[in-house]
Image: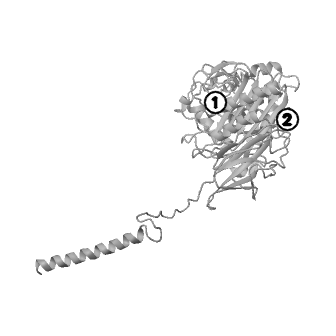
Amino acid sequence: MKRSEFYLKAKTLLMAVLMVSSSLILTNCGGGGSGEKGKIEPEPVTPVISTKCELSTFQFKATSNPGLVTNPSATIATIQNRNLVLITVPESADLTKLVPTFNASDKATVKLGGAAATSGVTAANFTNDVELVVTAEDGKHSKYYYVLVRKGNAEMDGEVYAIMKKYNIPGISVATTKNEKLAYTAGYGYAVIDQTPRVRVTPDMLFRLASVSKFQCALCIMSLYEDGLLSPDDYVFAPAGANGPDSKEGILQSMYPGAHATGVDQIKVRHLLTHTSGWQYATTGGVDPIFTGDSRFYGKNLKQRVEYMVKTAVSNTPGSVYSYYNLGYCVLGQIVEQVTGGTYEAYLKQVEAKAGITDVWMGKSSKSQLRANEVHYYAQQSTDAYQNDMNVVGACGAVINSAVNLMQLVCAIDYGTVVPDILQKETLDMVYTNYTSSGKGGYGFGWRIGHNTLTRWASYHGGNINGTATIIVRGNNGVHGVLLCNSRSYIDDFDTALYVGLDAIMSRVNSTY
């Protein structure tokens, strides 16, 4: 092809492209009757449909609820993967027809008890828990909440709601007394949260007590003492004559015959009561023989575990050093059975019956064995709330009792005059003597004595195992209290929060009742 022909064809092609481009420009700009050459029409905007479905506030305003003089507000919390709305109203409130005021995500709709609800307008019956559903504008996304309304003191209850929210606790029971009369009792949240029907906590429901069981074990021992069946100074394991020619055989010597490890034959009942047996966690390489997966103990029954300790674990000089040791109270339970010839549970019930308490038991290991009025337990951080063998835990932590029962029991061992004590004053003096320094206070027989900062506390005890956390207080100003949880948090300040929360409630009881 000649160069002239090539340029001619290229020029023709370029002209064709320019004509097509001009046509496209005229089509997309200014034309179409706009009358404004060069103006670009905006693309149509697709509306954004919200998927948000959150409930941000919930309260009962006095302006919407005749009879209310305050505006109670709810604590909204996600607990055990359920969204709870926890709120306390005055005793005068009519739970059958309360009008809530709430805020939800923009353009979301709300249903209360299955019916459409308008904030500040729609009334509902809150006698039982009520399902609240927030559905997003898109109609596809919804979030479910359970509204739990109770009558009571909002300030006291707020202490509990804060604990439940921060530490993922589904159910709490609280009971207090002032001058040996019940003052403020309450059940919060759910005893059963993961099944249908859900079951709300009441103050008379049974909870595992963990180490709050220990003061009840000491009560059994001192009841046997008052009946002349044993003494705190009796030896536990020693053969006759092991501690002098006239020394008696230990109470459990026949259960654990033969040679014993150094120091074991000097252990007395009082040493087990005060955690001064000489056994320490260092004795077994930092392992608690009751709560462990260590092959020396795991899968063994209580007698086998105690036998290992008696024959193998050297005891430091009994009575010389305080070291909190769960196994000691398990041995005390064995002493009760050896002396009475019956089960520990049977004698525990016999003793607490003197205080008018009949609904006290030894807890079982599995969920299927829970009593009808016992809460369910919820573990945290991949633990198992039912992993412990409660037959092994026994007297050191397996008792189940209610908050109300526990207050009734404390009133029967507190030197008071309104409720008759079931132990003599001299015996109570032994129980509440501070025998040794222990952390933030001292230790008596089954009770921590005093507290370095919570100075209104005469004695107290806490407890925890997987799925359970507890605290009980005998006050020195006539106010006692107990708080029981059906879950155990492993956040560092959890125990402190329980102590501070119960102390705040007791303080308000003292000033209110």
| Residue at the image point whose x is 14% and y is 80% from the top | 5
Circle 2 residue: 353
- Do the numbered discs 1 and 2 sit on residues whose CB atoms are within 8 Å? no
In the image, residue 181 above or below residue 360: above
Q: Nearest the camera: 33 or 72?
A: 33
Q: Earlier in the sequence, mark 1 or mark 2?
A: 2
Instruction: Looking at this view, name the residue that lies furthest to the left.
Output: 2
The image quarter containing residue 201 is: top right
Q: Which mark is residue 139?
A: none
Q: Residues within 10 Å of mark 1 (few under 14, many from 20)?
A: few
Indicate the position of residue 248 as horizontal and vertical percent values: 71, 23
Amino acid identity at mark 2: Ala
Q: Nearest the camera: 392 or 291?
A: 291
Question: What colour-coding does the image apply?
Answer: one colour
| Residue at the image point whose x is 62% and y is 28% from the top | 324
In the rendered view of the protein, which quadrant contains the C terminus?
top right
Indicate the position of residue 216 as horizontal and vertical percent values: 75, 32
How many numbered badges does the structure rendering display?
A: 2
Disc 1 is placed on an element classified as helix
User: Can residue 334 be spotted in the picture?
Assistant: no
Indicate the position of residue 367 as horizontal and vertical percent values: 69, 50
Indicate the position of residue 250 as horizontal and vertical percent values: 69, 27
User: Can residue 384 be spotted in the picture?
Assistant: yes
User: Which is in the foreground here, disc 1 or disc 2?
Assistant: 1
Direction from residue 218 to residue 326 in the image, left or right: left
Amino acid identity at mark 1: Thr
Disc 2 is placed on an element classified as helix
Real-space Cα separation, disc 1 to disc 2, in angstroms: 33 Å
In the rendered view of the protein, which quadrant contains the N terminus?
bottom left
Circle 1 residue: 496
In the image, residue 348 above or below residue 49: above
